[in-house]
Image (cartoon, helix red, strand yellow):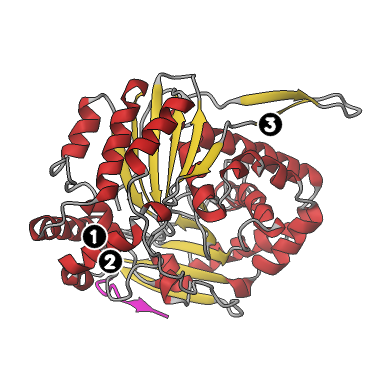
Amino acid sequence: MKNRILMCFFLASCVLSFAQNKDAQNKQTAQFNVPVEYYKLDNGLKVILSPDKSSPTVVVAVYYNIGFRIEPKDRTGFAHLFEHMMFQGSENLGKMEFIKLVQQNGGILNGSTRFDFTNYFEIVPSNKLETMLWAEADRMKGLDITQENLTNQQGVVKNEVKVNVLNQPYGGFPWLDMPQYANTNWYNAHNFYGDLKDLDAANLEDVESFFKTYYAPNNAAISIVGDFEISEAKAWIDQYFSGIPSAQIPAMPDISEPKQEKEKQFTKNDSLANKPALAVAYHMPVRNTPEYYAMGLLDQILIQGDNALLQKKLVDEKGYTSYVSGGINYLGNMFNYNGPMQIMFDVTYDNETSKQQVMDAVDEVIDGLSTKINQEMLDNAMVKIRSKLYDELSGTFGFGRADLLCSFALFDDNPARINTLEEEFKKVTPEIVKKTISEYLRKTNRTILVVNPLLANNEKTN
């Protein structure tokens, strides 16, 4: 999968409304107030408009409700392969001309495949909005699907797998590996980067069928964020997208996971690694439940930042590692997925340190967590998650906002959820957090994956 473009641009301002809190302390609080105008075309395309005049740029993001999870069972990696195919030409834009169009107009672009969606976005000067809408509609209407293009992109993706996973120390650890170990349902547990034999087996009929099935307007959402006029944007969207026919979308397969009742441990031998590494994953609560938001706060308490409990224990106190990284959804954030998920953290550590020492320290933190939880700890976690939300909304010229708007439109049919997130976290009480710890941070709900370095055998072992 291509990494999202990282840019050192200045942050576009998040639109805030400041309201006076009239409680006894008379504190002033700030709340999210993202402009959201949401509607659907007759063909089913979901449209979200969110103006922001703070920068003379505009983000166009098109999200298709197809990701790794539900790709064909004998075509692992196909959703990702198809992401590449979307840049190979359409009716009015030849091969790679979409990319040239964006770059020659002073913009940047990228695409990615995630668990539950495939996305494409452009960030351009605001006077090029119509051009980008025309271009996105052109490839939604139809791709230039040829054997030459398919063969070329099969080679590109296979090389990507070799470079990023097969020939890389800690390749695929833990973002690609852990779902395959922690989950039992094939849809959540297969190699979503793609087995090389499956990538080779893809044919033109597969590509054409996949496009007609999943790249239809009634399986997509488009968000526009930035400096634009709503009336103009609506007119252009109607002009370029309304004539694209909808499609019959297959019923969603069962992607649920059974409740895990026994701890799972695995070792992955890695001849290219020079130090052992360890990842621990716990199955998440269902999205949008009180426990889901509680786990978001626990992520801040346990993993995120220098004051996180695992950081203080494993790095500052024990000196077992120099970092603890992790969170909810390694391929995005805790909001932009729509199925079973894990909260996970990982470390590398010296050969002189044992896995048991690391896990003893982890257990010390987790086992004692419930007794430490109080309102002050939750308030501090709320400050951190609030800051993270602001970063999500304002980063990369508004792309973070476009991402959440499209995700909430696809998954919840309600992009306005973006303005309720803070309040949902505030509803979490110490009692809910303790219940979440008991139900979800139990040993029998976790999977431990260890990377064993400097060995030639790269097969999974129990």
Residue shown at 27% from the left, 75% from the top: 457
Amino acid beneath label 3: Gln
At mark 2, the secondary structure is loop
Q: Amino acid at mark 2?
A: Gly
Mark 1 or mark 2, which is nearer the start of the sequence?
1
CA distance separating discs 2 and 1: 8 Å
Q: Residue 6: which quarter of the image?
A: top left
Residue at the farthest right position: 24
At label 1, which amino acid type do we have?
A: Val
Closer to the camera in the image, 365 or 389: 389
Range of magenta residues = 454-462
The answer to whether 70 is drawn above or below residue 107 in the figure is below
Mark 3 vs mark 1: in front: 3
* Residue 461 picture quarter: bottom left
Label placed on residue 31: 3
Residue shown at 12% from the left, 55% from the top: 149
Residue at the image point whose x is 79% and y is 51% from the top = 429
For residue 261, above or below residue 93: below
Q: CA distance from mark 3 to mark 2?
A: 42 Å
